Image (cartoon, coloured by chain):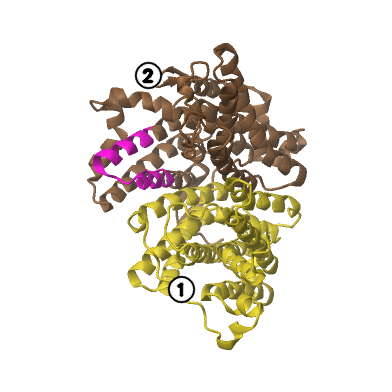
Chain colours: A brown, B yellow
Amino acid sequence: MIRLERRPQPSTFWTWLTPLLAVALTVVFGGVLFAMLGKDPLVAIRTIFFDPLFSQFASFYRPQLLVKGAPLVLIAIGLSFGFRAGVWNIGAEGQYIIGALCGAAVALALYPMEARWLIFPLMILFGALGGLGWAMIPGLLKVRFGTNEILVSLMLVYVAEQLLAAMALGPLRNPEGMGFPGSRNLTQYDSATSWIDRAGGMHWGVITAFLAVILAYVVMSRHILGFQIRLAGQSPRAAAFSGVNPGGLVLICLGTSGALAGLAGMFEVSGPAGQVSIDFNVGYGFTAIIVAFLGRLHPVGILLAGGLMALTYIGGEIAQSQLQLPAAAIQLFQGMLLFFLLAVDVLTHFRVRLRHREVA
Amino acid sequence: MFGSIDPSLLVASLMVAATPILLAAIGELVVERAGVLNLGVEGMMITGAVCGFIVAINTGSPYVGFAGAAAGAALLALVFAALTQWLLSNQVATGLALTLFGLGLSSLLGQSYVGMRAPSLPRVDFGVLSEIPFLGRVLFGHDPMVYVSLLIVAGVWAFLRYTRGGLVLRAVGENHAAAHALGYNVVAIRFAAIAFGGACAGLGGAYLSLVRVPQWTEGMTAGAGWIALAIVVFASWRPWRLLLGAYLFGGVTVLQLNLQASGVAIPVEYLSMSPYVVTILVLVVMSAGRAPGSLGKTFHAST
């Protein structure tokens, strides 16, 4: 019979191999899925994973990799702090929305003033504060009342979505928009746009995402806070004895992820999305959870995982237009990836033994 | 403002509004009493919603549809069971994966069913009883699933309280190591609980797509599964308090819908967010209950 034997230490070899194994399994089973949908599996997989990078139109798709990857990486880096410490912020989508609303509100309030040195930094500040504030709701409730942060942060996503709709239809609506819902286009407002090079897919969110990766790496491996986070995740009791303040850690983890998600939303609304609209949020906050796990909660891993996930988004869009592959198939594909990732993770912590049970 | 709302109709419609959440929550209650935290209720509900809808459309019978919904969602729950019980994966992460996967799966399965209308579920005929003023409409004017949900709540209560099986299930949830040492098969019991939870969530989802809406639209559960999870906490893991919580929540939903319809000067969006805000408030007030001892912990027998 098959028996699992706990390893004394998680295997480093499998720690890095399991994500690749999960991707491979997902590609195989994704192929089966595409075949069941009546598409040639090899063509579908080539369209999703290779065409965005190597086809003749790749120069058009490659910048998209930065555009889609930046918010995913930025949010996932923040989430990885909490996930490591056992603090589950599931509401990044809501913090992303509120960050975007706050950032956009600042810009729209100051429109049409021309002062990029003032307006853009203010937007960054308010975007981060918006996300941070929204994440502090589950944080403070958990610290003060012991409320479950998973449920509260998630409920706040639905609240944020309604708030977004209210803002797009009400206070932030474009006064010159003929009554259509949605705000002014921030990309046409030079003091507020996050674009640096639109054709190259370069905006300030991309730069911030790279900075966040470096900073997170330093904090996680060199700073006492990183040590405390890892300690709290592995053994809350040991952490308490070594003087870690559990409440403070909850607030730091939720605050960091909230601020980064808010920033991601702010850069998105003033760049790729361009305006506050009802359908502004497209689920980056949830996909970032997959990215964080796929990257093994490690900053460099998250960077790579964000790139891969961005690839499936772009490839998915190409497959949608060229092969008429339904959009939901890509969503399913991403969900499947997380399943396989969690399934093969058993190899990191356990040895698989094929042995008959011995009689004691 | 409230004058135009008939109280018996209000109570009757809050029961209908609460039923999907009640069904999902009672399933999750059993799962959590067995010591497993399945955060995938939303994913199982929406899978149940789409499975139930497809089966009902193709067979023309809503009853077969409900059976299909329960089976489909239970099957999805078994994926969660296999991952968390055999492959010992983290329950929080796996539950989230279940939700993300379920949302994708349901919109893929349901894409050719958008806009169709489900075969309707007739009310149960109680004859003269439904003619009784007020009580007749409230107690004897519903479709069968409302009564089924109440029966399940009563059944779960009786099972947990009076049967040997219920005692074993609670033992597994309180201390899986001790239950294992007594010779109970922790993994098998949890598998059964998780499958039951999935089936209930599926029924709840199908109630949305077959009775309450009754249509299939993508993402139609809109957080109902998460609210069900919150109600389990609110109820301190007790069946009758769960019923109270679900009907309370149904009341808030119906009230805000009535306010929307009556054209109060509050924007619709603020009224629509009220159920979620109320859920948060309720969680804050009611987080004093004691959770089952082994809730969310991975069980691995070393020998």
Q: Where are the magenta residues, as a range?
A: A311-336
> Which residue does the numbered mark 1 point to in the structure image?
B121
Vertical comparison of B281 with B3: above or below? above
Q: Label 2 to label 1, Cα distance in Å? A: 56 Å
What is the x, y in percent for residue A69? Answer: 44, 29
Q: Which mark is residue A200?
A: 2
Seen as rendered, the residue at the extreme bottom is: B128
What is the x, y in percent for residue B28? Answer: 59, 61
- Does residue A29 appear left or right of residue A92 in this picture? left
**At label 2, which amino acid type do we have?**
Gly
Whether tag 2 and tag 1 are in contact, CB under 8 A, the answer is no
Vertical comparison of A285 with B285: above or below? above
- Does residue B233 appear left or right of residue B79 in this picture? right
Q: Residues within 10 Å of mark 2 (few under 14, many from 20)?
A: some
Q: Quadrant of the C terminus of chain A?
A: bottom right
Residue B58: image quadrant is bottom left
Helix, strand or loop status at disc 1:
loop
* Nearer to us in this view, B246 or A102: A102
Name the residue rendered at 36%, 19% in the picture: A199
Magenta-colored segment: predominant secondary structure:
helix
- Residue B236 at least partly seen: yes
Is residue A220 covered in magenta? no
Helix, strand or loop status at disc 2:
loop
